[in-house]
Image (cartoon, helix red, strand yellow):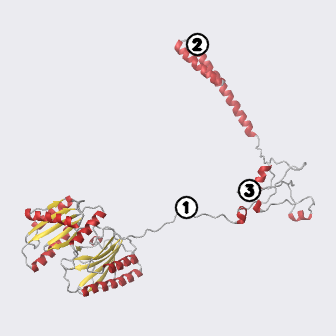
Amino acid sequence: MIRVLFIILAVVSMVLAFVLSISWLYLVSAGMLITAAVILTLDTRKRLRRTAVAGSRPPVVAETKDDLKSFGIMEIKPVQKARAPASQKESDARPEDAPVPVLPAASLPLVPEPAPLFSEPEPKAGVSPSEPGEKSTEIEATPVNQDSAILGGARPHISGVGVVRKRARTPKIMVEGVTEALRGDVVLSILRGLRSAVSATTVTLLRQEKAPLGYSVEAMVSQNSFARSGGRFTVAELLVRGDATLHPVISRCNGPKGFNARRLGYYHEPIAINKVAFITLTTGEHRYLLVCDSMSPDAFEDEDAGHMMRDFGRLVRSLVGGSEDSEPAQTQAGTLRPRREIIAEEMSNARGSAEPLALALVYLESDLNDSEKTTAEGVLAERLATSSLESRVERFGELTYGVMHRKTADDAARWASGLLQRFRDDPGGLSGGLSVGVAMMSDRHKGADSLRADATSALRESYETGECIVLE
């Protein structure tokens, strides 16, 4: 308190010296500050000296009777430093050396780690002897066994709460589809079983088309949302050569000599496929292809996978062959799916993946006979398929085709104008004029009929003006 008082007086003196312009008050203030510093130094030295003296004293361990009882020690007996061997002690035992009573382990309190307390035979400091004349004492007690002290020797129960268990994610089928000409439930069940048996990403049944050369998707089971559940796609050459029926042809999709996965036209866009297996199914005049692809580089390497592909392929061939034999007189037009169903399916897939959808109707105006119309339709379908590999091309009527794109309005307009310009530059054997009308799907289209009506209106306007029309 004195040094604090000196400091306060020094500050007051400095303020008065500054205000009253009295120079000797500065000396008084400086003297008070020096005095406070001297007092602080003396107090600090005295405190350090006291701490050093206190630290040089040996620590005193005071073990009271209560502290010993807490460790299960009930009695302290003095003994000599040098003990005789066990055999000599038994022979020279005196009557006054009574054994120390030891309590049962169940009655002793639980001690976390008692062993280090009694492992050293040296006497404990600070424990006064119970009898005069003895210089040292030693504590004798039986260490407490922790396992036997809990519930009579039973180990504690460890709860399983909080244990993290990993659960494998169940594979989910994203795309399924089958044509009306096949037994849908049966064929889809077989394809699901084959996909699960060989751990494939997509299993699809393709039917080979001749004019133009390509494949139509008859059935599809896929875990990838970019798979197409129907439609057809054209190819420059067959996906697999040879007529070996039910013999799986497995190819890798990487490397300079690998199979080009972009040729798998049953995807809306290229997928990172690592392996693909083709099983040829020949039934009558039609040729089918059962395709299994996988994104895993180790797929289809098991010998059982080849046997399963052959067995499932044989089963699919019997179903496909039976459907053709039961309806031999059915024409191609009769096997076509309703256009309304195809448009509704594409609208549902586009809205599910939050992508745009453009429905384009293309009409070839030409005076042709029946045979010439069939040839012209094949050429037109091929040119439409090659103009956009990611689109779905379907026949909507005589010399009329529908093309469904996952494109925006600007991209659809560029595609339509490019198609019309290429047709004018190179008709490719087609005569007449080409009309293109495009309708973009929006929220106001509640069903397939409204979207098709807008596309038909755009096609009619294109027919009248000779230009490409896009309705948003």
Residue at numbered disc 3: 116
Residue at numbered disc 2: 24
x, y percent for residue 437: 15, 64
- Viewer-closest of 92 and 265: 265
x, y percent for residue 465: 8, 62
The three-letter amino acid code for the residue at tag 3 is Pro
2 or 3: tag closer to the N-terminus: 2
Q: CA distance from mark 3 to mark 1?
A: 35 Å
- Viewer-closest of 290 and 164: 164
Q: Residue furthest left?
A: 367
Q: Residue at x 63, y 22 (%)?
A: 5
Q: Nearer the viewer, mark 2 or mark 3?
A: 3
Instruction: Answer few, some or many: residues within 10 Å of disc 2's Cα (few below 14, many 20 plus, some between 14 and 19).
Output: few
Image-quadrant location for residue 190: bottom left
The three-letter amino acid code for the residue at tag 1 is Gly
Tell me: 206 left or right of 308: left
Q: Secondary structure at mark 2?
A: helix
Quadrant into which the N terminus falls: top right
The answer to whether residue 266 is above or below residue 33 is below
Q: CA distance from mark 1 to mark 2?
A: 79 Å
The three-letter amino acid code for the residue at tag 2 is Trp
Residue 152 bears which disc, if any?
none
x, y percent for residue 281: 29, 84
x, y percent for residue 250: 34, 78
Residue at numbered disc 1: 162
Residue 147, visible in the rendered structure: no
Q: Residue at x 20, y 64 (%)?
A: 450
Instruction: Answer few, some or many: residues within 10 Å of disc 3's Cα (few below 14, many 20 plus, some between 14 and 19).
Output: few
Tell me: 408 left or right of 251: left
1 or 2: tag closer to the N-terminus: 2
Q: Secondary structure at mark 1?
A: loop
- Viewer-closest of 367 and 423: 367
